[in-house]
Image: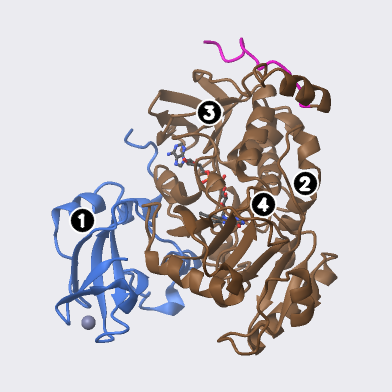
Chain colours: A brown, B blue
Amino acid sequence: MNSNALMSPSVRFSLFNLIKEGLSGNAGWPRQWRDPEPQPAYDVVIVGAGGHGLATAYYLAKEHGIRNVAVLEKGWLGGGNTGRNTTIIRSNYLWEESEALYEHSVKLWETLSDELNYNVMYSPRGVMMLAHNIHDVQVTKRHIHANHLAGIDNEWLTPEEAQEFCPILNISHDIRYPILGAALQRRGGTARHDAVAWGYARGADRLGVDIIQNCEVKGIRRDASGKVTGVETTRGFIGAGKVGVVAAGHTSVLMGMADIRMPLESYPLQALVSEPIKPIMPCVVMSNTIHAYMSQSDKGELVIGAGTDQYVSYSQTGGLHITQHTLDAICELFPMTRRLRMLRNWGGIVDVTPDRSPIIGKTPVEGLFVNCGWGTGGFKATPGSGHVFAATLARSEPHPIAAPFTLERFTTGRLIDEAAAAAVAH
Amino acid sequence: MLLIHCPYCNMKRPETEFRNAGAAHIARPLDPATTSDAEWAAFLYLRDNPKGIIAERWRHAHGCGRFFNAIRNTVSDDFVTTYKAGEAPPETEAFASEVAPGSREANATGKQAETAL
Ligand SMILES: Cc1cc2nc3c(=O)[nH]c(=O)nc-3n(C[C@H](O)[C@H](O)[C@H](O)COP(=O)(O)OP(=O)(O)OC[C@H]3O[C@@H](n4cnc5c(N)ncnc54)[C@H](O)[C@@H]3O)c2cc1C
Ligand SMILES: [Zn+2]
């Protein structure tokens, strides 16, 4: 099948279409993207069809006119961390470089459903981060001041104000880690994880990008000068002018194929959901100090997560004691959840850098680019990451917002140390 | 939860008694004054992060308190073996086959023109 022969029918989602399809059993929706055979070569090959890889392909086609692009995925699109995360979105990071990057992303979230004509269910319901001791209070207030200097909203709440915003919060003084206050970013919130991957996939596909699933990259081929010429895959060799690796927990494995060692370690990060209940939770609440965070999905499930397991692993599972530790904290913060049953728990493999900031840009190998190191907190950055990485790939020069996030910073020492800011999941 | 064999206590104990301390056998540069930025970066930050066999440090924090090393498969999380700090990594078959292709030396030069594939 020729990849260009069968473009998806251009049905736009609209109120009219929804009503029409609703009345006719929803039988008339066309498939949302093609299932093309790989072409012999592309201008750009993206490795990894998570949200970041798909967004990269979308912006390459949309903003840079580079449409001869393939996204290769070893499993199914959105089946990695994109489909496993707890969807917290915020931009109240400490350092200017991070503020610019995450705020760029939040701004894109605000209009993303319109941009893609796909409901990504972005819900700016507010993200509240709790402070439990003097150190927390000082660090949190420092963040708030830093954010104000950057024009990013973030405000200090007393325990009473925090409880007013989230009535089920336990602000009693008698608990082991009483709440001393909180930072609230009102523009923070959540979005629907799958919809983000699907929306970008549909958008990229329509612009001519080939999304090739069940296609694992096994090697990176280079010519005598060392320049990348393409990738070896389970579906044969695919030539490429440029290769962008966007493979989250598997980045070290892929970069190893081009003999590059990365400043990354891959850890399991777990999450779980409760049985669905009526709405009790109007916002997202996070506590980095006692390792727990929670929000409520539109289905009614409480979505709960915490910190990583302690050892390098690719097993997509983790220890039960980590989950238990999280639930201990949840039960103390939200006593009304104590008798809830948990429905499912799972793990993803997150790629963690020493300074907890991502790496976006060029590599020592010509034609090879990487976007990784998003660790426990890259879902929120999906639109912004794809946007700046597409520009970086198109121009072979870092986008200004991506420029500080180089691989070289680990040699020059110019780290962007968000580790202290949120060493736990976010 | 992992069950981990402490080579000092000579017992399998639950993971919650231990702290993982990252990749093993990373030697600090001997002469800081002549160590280049790239060598410091390699020592401080670059890691093999293997999908397969890893050599790593653990500390029996809530037991004997001592550091030791382990060989573990990062796909199954099974331990191949554990051994005392200061001992050379055992020549287990699984470990040897992992270290050979694309070994650290080959990776460090980064000069190979073409991959084997
Ligand atoms: C439990 C959990 C909770 C999280 N919670 C949050 C949160 O609340 N907020 C937040 O901002 N972030 C969160 N994150 C982090 C977030 O999920 C990630 O940073 C983000 O989704 C990464 O997106 P990605 O597209 O880079 O990676 P992925 O979605 O993992 O995509 C990478 C893709 O590459 C593919 N791939 C790998 N190797 C190959 C190969 N050799 N060939 C072809 N394809 C390959 C994989 O199959 C995968 O689909 C969480 C993560 C987890 C695991
Ligand atoms: Zn011991």
For ligand 1, tell me if the residue under mark 4 lies within 8 Å.
yes
Magenta stretch encompasses residue A10: yes
Which image quadrant: the C terminus of chain A? bottom right
Q: Name the amino acid, label 3.
A: Ala
The answer to which of marks 2 and 4 sits earlier in the sequence is: 2
- SS type, badge 2: helix
- Label 1–label 3 contact, CB within 8 A: no
Q: Which residues are magenta?
A: A1-13
What is the crowding at mark 2: few (fewer than 14 residues within 10 Å), some, or many (at least 20)? some
For ligand 1, tell me if the residue under mark 3 lies within 8 Å.
no
The residue beneath circle 2 is: A108
Looking at the image, which residue is at 60% across and 70% down?
A: A336
Tell me how far mark 4 sits from mark 1, CA to CA. 37 Å
Mark in the foreground, 1 or 3 = 1
- Label 2–label 1 contact, CB within 8 A: no
The residue beneath circle 1 is: B95
The residue beneath circle 4 is: A381
Q: Is residue A300 above or below residue A127?
A: above
Q: Name the amino acid, label 1.
A: Phe
